[in-house]
Image: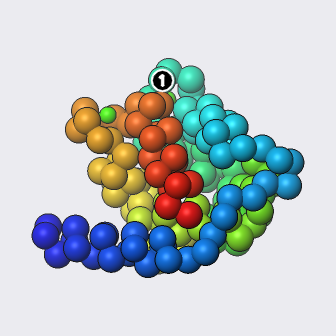
Amino acid sequence: MKAFVCLAVLLVSCWAEEACKHSNIAQKTEEQVIAEVVRDADHDRDGSITDLDVVQFFVFNFDHNKNGEVDRTEFANQWHATYKDEKAFAEHVFDHIDMKTDGVLNIDDIPLLENRADTDGSGVISVSEFQTYLEAIYAAC
Ligand SMILES: [Ca+2]
Ligand SMILES: [Ca+2]
Ligand SMILES: [Ca+2]
């Protein structure tokens, strides 16, 4: 566990060193984009982001070749098309969400994502926890 925390800290500091700036072709602010993502991710609008919401959000919207996984290119293209962030920035978002760092988002990332975002340990990611998680990703970039 301790080794994992150290690794996580290392990875975060690596990301922080990259000169990456939020830019959006529609001039949306980070706050506007995050609000849209949170709204879309809570697919059934019940105030929490469940496994099913995550699968519906990512697999249905982003998995263009329908192979059950979302790769970095699929993610960047769709994030850019939907939220208008620059693709390079969308790739940074992907790198944070790809918890297993194997280059694809799939069901293996979900438990890791939940561990990371469920900060009160309630077993479910609330809309506000998901928002905080996204804000951290945008701020780290
Ligand atoms: Ca939900
Ligand atoms: Ca795919
Ligand atoms: Ca929670």
**Residue 50 picture quarter:** top left
Say left or right for 104 vs 31. Answer: left
Kindly identify the amino acid type of the residue bearing the numbered disc 1: Gly
Residue at left offset 77%, top offset 62%: 86
Residue located at (37% from left, 46% from top): 117
- Give the number of callouts: 1
Residue tagged 1: 47
Q: Is residue 141 above or below residue 24?
A: below
Nearer to us in this view, 115 or 28? 28
The reply to whether residue 64 is in sight is no
Q: Which quadrant holds residue 94? A: bottom right
Q: Is mark 1 within 8 Å of ligand 1?
A: yes
Q: Position of residue 37 (x, y in %)?
A: 63, 41
Q: Quadrant of residue 89?
A: bottom right
The quarter in which the N terminus is drawn is bottom left
Camera-side residue: 85 or 124?
85
